[in-house]
Amino acid sequence: MRGDFVRNEFLKKGNLLAPVLHERKIAAVRIGHTEADDSWDGYRFVEDDYPASFQKGESFCIDFGEHCTGYLSFVMTAPHQYPDAPTKLRFRFAETLQELGTPFEECKGNFCRTWLQEEIFIADDPDSYSLRRRYAFRYVEVKIEIAKAPICLDRFVATGFTSANWTQLKPVQFPERLAQLDKVGCNTLSECMQRVFEDGPKRDRRLWIGDLRLQALGNYETFDNLDLVLRCLYLFAGYTKPGKHT
């Protein structure tokens, strides 16, 4: 009983340290498709003109210009006639051009296939929509699987979230190349800083003690979010299993 009381107290302390998630919106920068080439990841992004409308069976790819961990929103309109049936869309999210260019059906591996970032979405009427699930991505492939009438899809926005406060980032002086690498590293860390330190924002999305140590060390030198580290330690303490000494 005493052990349960102590664990509950740790959980209360951890919950009191729940962070504020900072929001940023990223608009899509270009539309196009992928083509195989001889680059290191085997694909390149080819920009296309934005069509006036899309029909059943057509697809296109969106590039947001940077990586984002968050939610996708868009607007669907019917420029020619009102569709008298729901529209079925398939979204596929990718972090790299290789992932974007490779059909998920060709993916091999032992991890659960539900970690592949895709979603079937049914739009009942022309309207503004936001997908419910969170994704980690830079690119999005959109396929119009079923559409009773031509539709227009635009105003794609990625809304990212992190508990890292970029205004608190500790300044450093690096040569240009190292500064670019440091920026990428800070962005990677910030996207793992959600309500806890996640081992990765794309797959697993869990708090692990080994990852926490490495992330905390990086955090001390960058965003210095001590409350998030303390919150994670309290959560670990609160979720320990009862033992013979408790």
Image: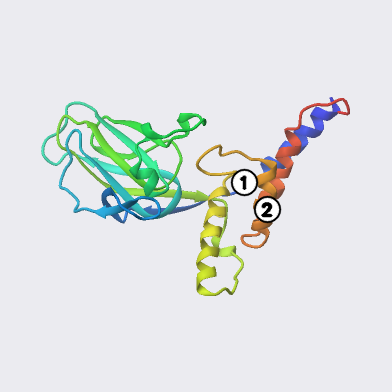
Q: Residues within 10 Å of mark 1 (few under 14, many from 20)?
A: many
Asked if 79 appears above or below 162 in the picture, the reply is: above
- 45 or 109: nearer the viewer: 109
Q: Which residue does the image show at 59% across and 74% down from the upper left?
A: 173
Q: Position of residue 95 (x, y in %)?
A: 42, 47
Q: Secondary structure at mark 2?
A: helix
Residues tagged 2 and 1 counted as in contact (Cβ below 8 A): yes
- Dot 1 falls on a residue whose secondary structure is loop
User: Quick check: 206 left or right of 66?
Assistant: right
Q: Residue at x 50, y 29 (%)?
A: 112
Q: Which residue is mark 1?
A: 197
Task: Tell me, yes or no, if residue 17 can be seen here.
Answer: no
Label 2 Cα neighbours within 10 Å, binned few <14 / some 14-19 / many ≥20: many
Number of disc labels: 2
Q: Nearer the viewer, residue 151 or 36?
A: 36
Q: Which residue is mark 2?
A: 216
Q: Position of residue 15 (x, y in %)?
A: 67, 40
Q: Give the image quarter of residue 142.
A: top left
Q: Earlier in the sequence, mark 2 or mark 1?
A: 1
Answer above or below: position of 127 versus 162: above
| Residue 97 in view here | yes
The amino acid type of the residue labelled 1 equals Phe
Residue situated furthest right in the rendering: 245
Instruction: Using the rendered view, name the quadrant where residue 122 is placed.
Output: top left
Asked if residue 29 lies left or right of residue 223, the reply is: left
Instruction: Where is residue 26? Give x, y as percent.
Output: 38, 54
